[in-house]
Amino acid sequence: MPYNIAMVSDFFYPQPGGVESHIYQLASKLSDRGHKVIIITHQYDTRSGVRYLTNGLKVYYVPFFVIYRESTMPTVFSFFPIFRQIVIREKIQIVHGHASLSSMCHEAILHARTMGLRTCFTDHSLFGFADAASILTNKLMKFTLSDIDHVICVSHTCKENTVLRASLDPVNVSVIPNAVVAENFKPDPTAASKDHITIVVISRLFYNKGTDLLVAAIPRICEIHPTVHFLIAGNGPKAIDLQQMIEKHMLQDRVELLGPIRHEEVRDVMVRGHIYLHPSLTEAFGTVLVEAASCGLYVVCTEVGGIPEVLPSWMTVFARPEEDDVVSATCRAIAELRRGNVKTEKFHKRVQKMYSWTNVAMRTERVYDNISNAERGTLMDRLKRYYGCGVWAGKLFVICAAIDYLLWWLLEIWYPRTSIDEARDWPKKEVVVKDCKEGSGIRVGRRGE
């Protein structure tokens, strides 16, 4: 059965990143399987309003104020009027939110439940339990996920973390990993230098991505191996630390900073290297590791979060998130490559068999089937779940849900559904699909029939 799906997140193109790529690829594959998918995100610079991507995917860029790292200002209720219009215009049945730190995602799930829609959430991150930011984020997660149909996590480690943070029943949480379009990350043996080993780093330059470890490790690795060069792409507040390190140790001819790059340029940068270094301090999955292996790079990464689940051990060298161990692991990888013990030319075909966005879409589709057949709770059921979220927080959540419900009825009276025009669907190509009836062969029809 085809569904009308709205994927909501603060993080989407033109900003590059793992969450952004996940949403785009999943939406594209679900569209290929006959579903109608739209994206709702916030305005990016001058990119505002309704845009169509090249594959016909419709994106609503809502003009909301961004406060930090592309996250919008949390307002709880101000998003509801425009969200309701989009949902009614597009005849949405399922709202699928992405990313714990997306205010727009949390608000969309609240409003969708108020409107009686099915909801799903995909968590792409790991968070702690002790610092102030994590405590507030976890309480927000508990509010949002206490009244949701199903939760998806990108790794088993991420699932354990999410279940603990939001006090969820593990039965209602599925693990569906990220994937990669292997055809877009083919190796090119002629692109890498034959004279020296090139280590590639492609990452946002933030503390949690291990940039401080990188700053400390690069001079030591360059001192131990005089023929090693670094190629670093990415942008962030820690970029200045890398520049200062290069000047301090006079490594201008051995460390090249490329700055921010577009996702379509990632492969061209990766094939110039032999090793991919990923010193992250926390990671739920790490799609860039799969992309690097697909390009034929030997991967050196920290053994944190869901990273050990991503690639087999013969493709990776693991290190503890410590300076000495990162240096040691990188040196071991260099030695293994020079001895010819690692057959990186086999990595691409192995990754191609391991990860597929079509498989991710099929598994997500089964989640949609399950939540569509589940029983719908009443408003009192929702309020009871919110009330159980804490002595003080529970009462606050009940008030928010009650106000949201009242606002919905006011909008239904003030701006009735009959006055909202339904949007025309993007024309679909004719495809050959198998008929559901046994023994009836195949039929030709439009997607979504």
Image (cartoon, rainbow, N blue to C red):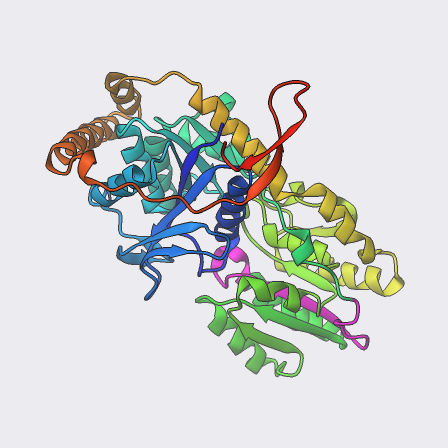
Q: What range of the chain is rendered magenta?
A: 189-211
Question: Where is 101 relative to 117, above or below?
Answer: below
Question: Where is 223 relative to 346, above or below?
Answer: below
Q: Quadrant of residue 294?
A: bottom right
Residue 445 image position (x, y, % from top left): 55, 35
Inspect this view and state whether residue 65 appears. yes
| Number of numbered callouts drawn | 0
Q: Nearer the viewer, residue 43 or 59?
A: 59
In the shown orientation, is residue 13 left or right of residue 42? right
Residue 197 lies within the magenta run: yes
| Residue name at image x 46 percent, y 31 percent | 151
Q: Nearer the viewer, residue 336 or 109?
A: 109
Residue 231 lies within the magenta run: no
Q: Nearer the viewer, residue 411 or 77?
A: 411
| Residue name at image x 61 percent, y 26 percent | 435
Inspect this view and state whether residue 325 appears. no
Question: Where is 218 relative to 98, above or below?
Answer: below
| Residue name at image x 84 percent, y 55 percent | 343
In the shown orientation, is residue 354 left or right of residue 136? right
Q: Nearer the viewer, residue 190 or 146?
A: 190
In the shown orientation, is residue 52 left or right of residue 353? left
Residue 334 image position (x, y, % from top left): 78, 64
| Residue name at image x 80 percent, y 57 percent | 344
Residue 69 image position (x, y, % from top left): 38, 58
In the shown orientation, is residue 220 left or right of residue 155? right
Residue 262 image position (x, y, % from top left): 53, 65
